[in-house]
Amino acid sequence: MPQNMSDNVDKAARLFAEQETFIRGTIGYFVSDRQEREDIYQDLFVYFVRKPIPEDIVHLRTWLYRVILDRIRDRKRSQARYQQHLQTYAQEQLETEMQPRQRAVDPDRIDALFALIQEHLSPHEARAIRYKFVHHLSVQQIARYMKVKSTTVSNYLAVGLNKLRTLLNKDDT
């Protein structure tokens, strides 16, 4: 290991020994998942090995706070981009696997399906399903429109779709 790198590791280790409580507390304030907090803590150590503290820092904790916050934001943005890429890829795969005749759905069947939705689902479940499958909104977007939590929207969708499956299976028998 080059001498400069060895010095950087020593400096980062000293910083983390002296400021561990502050660093962990700051991360913990913004990140609730225990494993995510630990990953960010480890990433910060590597970051400080690569980019040691500048010599002209006057208020160390203020500077540390900014660096920690920036690293958390960068990580969240990266995770969001990754999730978006996964969703796009999954959608593309679904569309390429569908046969052309499967993509063109009979409008009468769609109308009948939405009549079933309105008749047999609660207004919240029906609204969530319409937002999801007609307007192609994400769960988070639906939650904002409906002014509820994302978990509530997920529950509406799950319950509503289960009711629809049950209804549609009854019609097949």
Image (spheres, grey):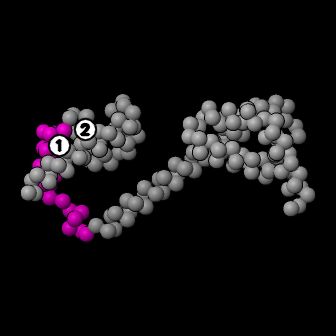
What residue do we see at 20% from left, 67% from top? 101
Residue where numbered disc 2 is placed: 125
Instruction: Tell me the amino acid under the disc marked 1.
Output: Ile
Mark 2 closeness class: few <14, some 14–19, many ≥20 residues within 10 Å: many
What residue do we see at 65% from left, 44% from top? 38
Q: How many marks?
A: 2
Q: Residue 110 lies in magenta, yes or no? A: yes
- Res. 117 mark: 1
Which quadrant of the figure has residue 130? top left
> Where is 107 relative to 94, above or below?
above
Q: Quadrant of the C terminus?
A: bottom left
Residue bounds of the magenta highlight: 99-121
Residue 69 pos. (x, y %) = 66, 38
Secondary structure that dominates the magenta span = helix
Residue 40 pos. (x, y %) = 65, 45
Q: Are marks 1 and 2 in contact (CB under 8 Å)?
A: yes
Q: Find numbered disc 1 in the image and state the secondary structure of the residue it sits on.
A: helix
Instruction: Tell me the amino acid under the disc marked 2.
Output: Glu
What residue do we see at 77% from left, 31% from top? 61
* Distance between mark 1 and mark 2 Cα atoms: 8 Å
Q: Is residue 119 visible?
A: yes
